[in-house]
Image (spheres, rainbow, N blue to C red):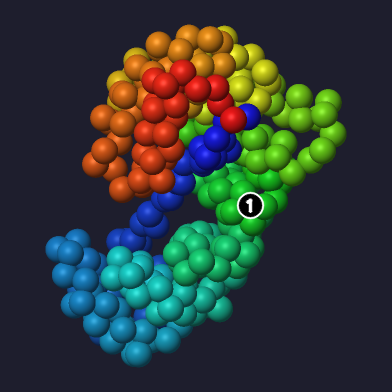
């Protein structure tokens, strides 16, 4: 067994910024003053004058409370300002006026994510998909939230649905591989784990076919080979990750252990030295640096692993 390094790969988080509705309001009965304030808010937003844009939209909805596009745009501005509680209220107000307002459901889901309200985010991604089954971004973000909630089987299904819409998304293939790994981690049936490991590797390989320089996919693929007991392929795959990113700490760290396991002690010592050099200024590697120093010292003294 490896020491200390968490073997479970990490997902790449994806997010998609909601678009401001810049078209003229579609409600035929809007008053002229509300229309002017709406367009003024759009102009301020384009100029990145967010405070002024927010004020214009606030005045607009004060004059015309049923102006759903203004509520939506106000939510976008609040989101850019990271005023998430206000953003949520604005989108909810827009949705109270039109429950089929897909953009508002989508952006509300993003706002709930930003507020770490994952269950509520999921509900609104589901609503977007109910309104439009081809909503690629909603399928992807739904899957990411499902992983966060520990709903790994559901996440796998969502990623697969996204890939049925567009199979050219390397990040989605990568995240699908992560979901397979997470699902494998919570089951005990060995044949199922083996199949999930195979599917995980296939997903990373698909990501790499689309993006050969995807070093995190090379790394995760190496970890998957480790779990499958294929040590030689694990080593070869860490080396591929290091071809792309020469001083990738996690790959150097794990590869040092792998070389020792196959009896290549000199190579293991060289990898520990490379790891220490690559990681000396990385605060996130502090714990592992201490371990690497002990492992290198042990090898140099000719002591076996405990």
Rendered location of residue 100, percent (x, y):
58, 65
Quarter the C terminus occupies? top right
Residue at far bottom of view: 62
- Binning the other alpha carbons within 10 Å of mark 1 as few (below 14), some (14 to 19) or many (20 upward) gives many
Q: Nearer the viewer, residue 108 or 32?
A: 108
The residue that appears at 35% across and 62% down in the rendered structure is 21
Q: Is residue 5 visible?
A: yes
Task: Report if residue 199 is visible in the image.
Answer: no
Residue 32 quadrant: bottom left
* Left or right of 141 in this view: 288: left
- Circle 1: element type: helix
Q: Quadrant of residue 149?
A: bottom right
Judged left or right of residue 274, residue 192 is: right
Residue at 42% x, 34% y is: 294
Q: Is residue 55 above or below residue 126?
A: below
Say if 226 sits above or below 68 in the image. Answer: above
- Residue at position x 83%, y 26% from top? 191
Asked whether 20 or 212 is in front, the reply is: 212
Query: Which corner quadrant of the image does residue 184 belong to?
Result: top right
Q: Which residue is drawn at the image coordinates 74% and 44% (left, top)? A: 186
Q: Which residue is mark 1?
A: 146
Nearer to us in this view, 56 or 51: 51
Which x, y percent locates residue 144?
56, 48
Quadrant in the picture for the N terminus: top right
Q: Looking at the picture, how far across and down is residue 116, in whole percent? A: 51, 66
Q: In the picture shown, does residue 141 fall above or below 66? A: above
Q: Eyeballing the image, is 205 above or below 263?
A: below
70 on left or right of 120: left
Is residue 43 or residue 203 the one in the foreground?
A: 203
Q: Residue 152's spot in the image, x, y percent?
A: 69, 45
């Amino acid at each position: 067994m490896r020491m200390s390094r968490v073997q479970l790969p990490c997902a790449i988080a994806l997010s998609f910024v909601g678009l401001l509705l810049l078209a003229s309001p579609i409600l035929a009965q809007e008053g002229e003053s509300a229309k002017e304030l709406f367009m003024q808010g759009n102009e301020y937003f384009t100029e990145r004058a967010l405070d002024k844009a927010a004020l214009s939209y606030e005045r607009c909805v004060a004059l015309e409370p049923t102006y759903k596009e203004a509520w939506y745009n106000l939510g976008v501005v609040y989101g850019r300002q990271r005023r998430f509680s206000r953003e949520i209220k604005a989108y909810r107000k827009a949705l109270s006026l039109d429950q089929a307002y897909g953009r508002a459901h989508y952006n509300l889901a993003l706002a709930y994510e930003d507020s770490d309200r994952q269950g509520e985010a999921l509900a609104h991604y589901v609503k977007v998909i109910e309104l439009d089954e081809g909503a690629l971004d909603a399928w992807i973000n739904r899957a990411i939230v499902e992983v966060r909630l520990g709903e790994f089987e559901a996440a796998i299904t969502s990623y697969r649905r996204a890939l049925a819409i567009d199979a050219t998304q390397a990040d989605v293939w990568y995240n699908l591989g992560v979901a397979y790994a997470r699902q494998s981690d919570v089951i005990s049936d060995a044949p199922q784990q083996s199949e999930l490991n195979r599917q995980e590797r296939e997903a990373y390989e698909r990501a790499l076919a689309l993006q050969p320089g995807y070093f995190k996919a090379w790394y995760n693929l190496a970890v998957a080979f480790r779990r499958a007991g294929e040590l030689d392929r694990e080593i070869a795959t860490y080396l591929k990750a290091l071809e792309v990113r020469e001083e990738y700490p996690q790959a150097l760290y794990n590869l040092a252990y792998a070389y020792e396991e196959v009896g290549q002690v000199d190579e293991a010592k060289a990898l520990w030295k490379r790891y220490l050099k690559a990681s000396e200024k990385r605060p996130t590697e502090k714990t592992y640096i201490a371990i690497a120093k002990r492992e290198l010292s042990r090898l140099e003294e000719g002591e076996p692993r405990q």
